[in-house]
Image (cartoon, rainbow, N blue to C red):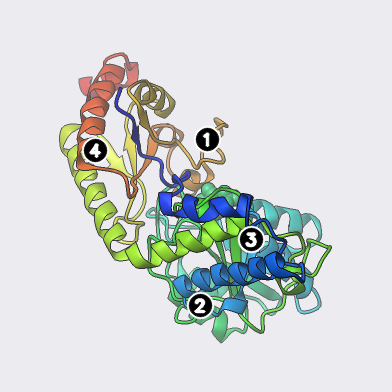
Amino acid sequence: MRQVYLDYSATTPVKKEVLEEMLPYFSEKFGNPSSLYGIGLNAKSDLNQARAKVAKLIGAEEREIYFTSCGTEADNWAIIGTARAKKAKGNHIITSKIEHHALLHSCEFLEKEGFEVTYLDVDSKGLISLADLEHAITDKTILISIMFANNEIGTIQPIKEIGEIAKKHGIWFHTDAVQALYNVPIHVTELGIDMMSMSAHKIYGPKGIGALYIKKGVVISSFMNGGAQENKRRAGTENMPGIIGLGKAAELAEANMEEHIRHISELRDYFADQILSKISEVEINGSMEHRLPGNINFIFNYIEGESLLLLMDAKGISASTGSACSSASLAPSHVLKALQLPYEKIHSSIRFTIGDDTTKEDIDYAVEEIVKIVEKLRAISPIYKQSTKG
Ligand code: PLP
């Protein structure tokens, strides 16, 4: 049976070139970068080359990149590290209601320690209001953390404008760019970003490795205690194969970004046109104008998303009802809830994300099968029958 993977926001396959570059670091190039002899020194030099590649992709300096174990750790570190470092100045953080749980749960953790958090609303398209942001700032605000692009509905926030507001008020600005990296050109200094989270497995690198960009001059507390790795800011022997993989994925991302964005946006638009023209009562969640190029999130009215997902899986098509991290739970997505969608529409929503390996044939196959499945499910849906009776 044909397999059509349409869940590239959950994770991406490791590119062949990335894997090839990683493999020697499991065996012959096994040195510890902290060792002061040949293979250790070579490892240190390779480590810093990977760091330089990540820095180049986002317009940063090599010393501003700190490797972490994943995007989640980068988010935790930015939020909790800032809170601890800036406690004397204030205890207020501003974020949004549609952040990833890595961010939201870090904020909830800090609330229990006495910090105050403002969770900004988003409009029906999934965008924050800059006026609301500015209005929320107090003299106790120490951090603004707004995600670059959302993992479920793909909306891209006005990052440059947020950076300007943060700068005007002398507040640090962190953004979670786990989904945006490789899908949107990013230049951290032009965008006024002070800290930015990244993850390798969303850009065709390995799982279990991420990075936090920390602008020079921004000093946050560390929470991994131990050795002097990562310029004494993030202890722990470096995950060399992972770091080399992230570096290679970043290098390829930089070289291929234009073609990648063109390819996935063309297929996404084709997919959306096909679904909207062949199936009635379908809506799109989130802004089409400010959106990740490979993301589309449909509401298939009168259908239970989980049923659609299972029947698609039986035809070899993979997609997702929520973000990868929360799809194991049936709790309604906090992102779709923030759009003020009624419960039924939340449960009829499915996210599809297109990637480098997706072809037009994949999309044609997926459309053909989805049309049949939707017809079948609506034929047994009492609410659909009721609605068509008017
Ligand atoms: N932030 C966003 C927006 C994500 O989509 C994800 C993963 O889905 C993460 C953070 C967490 O990254 P990681 O899986 O590397 O921990």
Say whether disc 4 or disc 1 marks the residue closer to the N-terminus.
1
Identify the amino acid type marked 4: Ile
The crowd level at tag 4 (other Cα within 10 Å; few <14, some 14-19, many 20+) is many
The spot of residue 114 in percent (x, y) is 80, 61
Disc 4: residue Cβ within 8 A of ligand 1's nearest atom: no
The crowd level at tag 3 (other Cα within 10 Å; few <14, some 14-19, many 20+) is many
Say which residue label 1 marks. Answer: 327
Say whether disc 2 or disc 3 marks the residue closer to the N-terminus.
3
Say whether disc 1 or disc 3 marks the residue closer to the N-terminus.
3
Query: In this view, which residue lies farthest toward the right?
Result: 226
Say which residue label 3 marks. Answer: 74
Query: Residue at the location (25% across, 59% down)?
Result: 262
The spot of residue 15 in percent (x, y) is 42, 50
Say whether disc 4 or disc 3 marks the residue closer to the N-terminus.
3
Query: How far separated are the C-alphas under marks 2 and 3?
Result: 19 Å
Is residue 181 left or right of 105 when viewed as pictured? left
Say which residue label 2 marks. Answer: 163
Identify the amino acid type marked 3: Ala
